[in-house]
Image (cartoon, coloured by chain):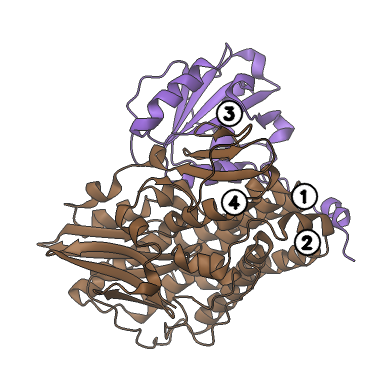
Amino acid sequence: MKILLGTFRKDDEEYYIVQEDGVISIEMDPQDMYIANYSLAKSRDLIVVPEKSVKNGEGVFDFRYGPVTSGIGEAGVYHLYTYGERILSVEIDLSYKHRDIVKRMIGLDPEHGLKMAENICGNFAFSHSFAFSMAVESGVGKIIDSKSQRLRIIALELERIYNHLYVISQLAQAAAQKVFASHMSYLFEESLRLNKAFSGSRYLKNFNKIGGIKDFDDGKIQNLKTNIQKIVNDFRDLYDRSLVSGNFLDRLYSTTVLKVQDAVNFGITGPTLRAAGAKEDLRYEDKRYDDLKVPIRNDGDALSRMEVRAEEIFESERIILKECEKFNLDVEKSNDSNKGIGYAESPTGTIVYKVDVKNSILSDLYIVTPSFWGFNGLVNSLTGNVFTDFQFGVESFGINFADAAL
Amino acid sequence: MKWWPVRGITRHLTEKSSYELDSSVKPMNNIFKRSLHIYMIDVGNSNLLNFELKALQSTQYNTHRFGIYFSDSPRHSDLLIVLGKPTEKMITPLMNTIKQMPEPFGILIVEEDEVFDLKLPNVVGRLKNPEPSEILGTLLKIMGRN
């Protein structure tokens, strides 16, 4: 199935960024199957509204949550329309976090552009950096050495692991599972420390550069292997325990359901889409990942999203260990992407960069982020849930304002 | 069935008790030696600082043993942590939040690569891209414990 991720204009023609079966392509002719989110892709409005909104009725009021509240943590506003218990409709205002990044990036040289791309969203820093560097490199036809390619794959999986650990720790906290949440927060901090030991930065920043990876000491591979196994084994034990904890699972089961067709219509990718039942991952079509086993669930609720993320942690561990084993071997040639297009499967979904470089300066830029589409999915899936389920919905999508409002 | 509490009590996860200091930070007021309640406000950071503050609340640092608590409202707090450089729309909410802080209070500015040029009252310190252990060391200094 085709998923429309974005649309941009160039030389008076309209182009569509489309994901289908793990491949990103640029199309010129819009087709019925992804017309559903066309207007959203075109306007990219910072006020996210649901398809059907209910704002009036007996006792219905606007419960404004944000931008200064400890429950969200980030600068953004949720308008929850409710009469007290059930959420009738939700609007999300992303504009408080708007930093005008695209405009500020145009006119920079690619090296500085890379730095800005890393600063869009700190917890997806490496995915942004990966997609941006791929876009610039494909534009000039630069070949990346095998070692750098392997290191990039490892860093992308490390980012996935710490983000998934964070999401599950937040879900445990929201369900008041104190022991589980404390141990998860321990693993989260350990994974950040491992990132630092591996790349020099807790968030894998300043590790990637245009054309490869900055200096890397091969001796760090052994430390990575030992520690990643320690963290993931620890997590495996915790996760097994959480799956027999009835009062934890009850909070997540059938909460904020997003059906697969709706997910596709809203341009959702990543674990949220896979938890709704679609077998869609950019890594499937990448030859560098062989026999990839990405978990799929069918319910599309918060529990499915947590299960998909948990199992992705195990898969990421396998990928990292495999890359470490083959560290000194050549990689298979990856697919040729379109010129000037770069993409990455971030922990929450597809990130795409379309970059034009003229005279070593970024002359045009278009960025697709998974959180923008995630918020569109969220407003539609929150409808009809009760107030106390709000946190599970928000956390299980793994989205944030920094990534959505550029 | 695997039982939670057994795992909970058999592992000791809290780490060392002293943390590196930032000498530019001054102790705020000697009444906060045993308890400091913190409210953090994001005004436009890349979510990285939010993650660092979440990491500070992890088991390794165990901030509660020092009496450091994160509160849910600026009205219950002694220290306001401002994360990032304010976006245009966040300046007013930030100022309104500062007005709600009870006296005496302090403000700790935590920045990323972009520098912050707004004049705020009662600023007790500035940190740039800190790690949780650095933030904790600074908080202890602000409390006058170190």
Q: How many marks?
A: 4
Quarter of the image where one finds residue A16:
bottom left
Q: Identify the residue at the far front of this view.
A: A58
**Chain A, which colour?**
brown
Relative depth, front residue between B109 and B77: B77
Q: Real-space Cα distance between discs 2 and 4?
A: 24 Å
Residue pointed to by mark 3: B39
Residue pointed to by mark 1: A177
Residue pointed to by mark 4: A382
Residues under numbered marks 1 and 2 in contact, where contact means CB atoms less than 8 Å apart: yes
Q: Real-space Cα distance between discs 3 and 4?
A: 28 Å
Residues under numbered marks 4 and 1 in contact, where contact means CB atoms less than 8 Å apart: no
| Helix, strand or loop at mark 3 | strand
Chain identifier for the purple-coloured part of the image: B
**Subunit ID for the residue under disc 2:** A
Residue pointed to by mark 2: A242
